[in-house]
Image (spheres, helix red, strand yellow):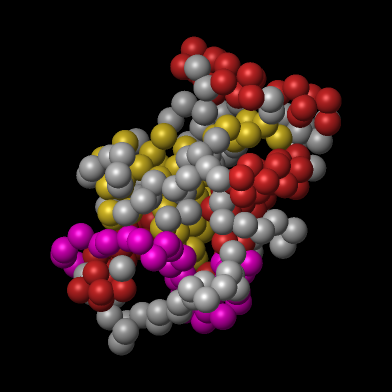
Amino acid sequence: MKESFIAGGFSEERCRYTILDNRGENRYEGFGGFNTAQADTQEPYLIYCHQDLILPPGDGYGRLLGIMEEMDRTDPRWAVLGNAGWADLTHVALAISDPVWVNRRLGNLPQRVQSLDENFLVVKTASGLRCSPELSGYHMYATDLCLVASQRGYHCYVIDFLLTHLSQGNKSRDFYEVRRRFVHRWSREFAFRFVRTPSTILFLSRYRPLRLLLDSRLVRYVVSRPITIRLLSRLFPLPS
């Protein structure tokens, strides 16, 4: 990953690389790892990404800088950029190659989104964003960042910055535990809110009976059907 980024212009003269090394033991997880990186960053932008990415040949550095400069012109309130996410229950946005998709682009990029995939994130450090301290694990920290950003008046986008991600992730037991704690944490903030992430659909509500009903597997299956999604997207559009 580092070799491909250096070849693409992200030289060590221009960039500082920090490795969150879990080879010997799991010293870092996604939420706390991001907060550690953000606290240690004096640079204007932080790229927080997986180690199994390959940057295609070319001037990736110049291309990403150009995208960020254009974002500054069109929406100075942007805080997090990624390469895959959901704008609402209906519209996915992505620019990625992985074991499922090859050079796949969807959405009107750059596309404002309510969730992002964790494999590649670009964060404007001046936003001061941190992941929720009460959450931990290796899943959904990008969506957590998106919700924190939204609460603070910032916006998140999928951009046209194509990378190859060498894996597609998995839903282990840890995923479902992180999901449970995520719903518990964020339900305090909403009365009625569906959020679609790259890996699941969430229903968030401070009203526990409603949450238990609408965050069930059956309801999530019904909500994921195209007709239901179109109806819910009209009722609950992306917040401005």
Residue 86: give x, y in percent of width and height. 47, 38
Looking at the image, which is closer to me, 40 or 225? 225
Q: Quadrant of residue 3?
A: bottom left
**Image coordinates for residue 128, horizontal then vertical, percent:** 61, 68
The residue drawn where x is 20% and y is 60% is: 56
Q: Is residue 212 magenta?
A: no
User: Is 113 situated above or below 120?
Assistant: above
Q: Residue furthest left?
A: 58
Specify the farthest residue to the top: 227
User: Left or right of 96: which side holds 23?
Assistant: right
| Closer to the camera in the image, 14 or 57 | 57
Magenta residues span 32-59
Image quarter for residue 145? bottom right
Q: Is residue 154 left or right of residue 186?
A: left
**Image height check: is 235 above or below 50?**
above
x, y (%) of residue 224? 52, 22
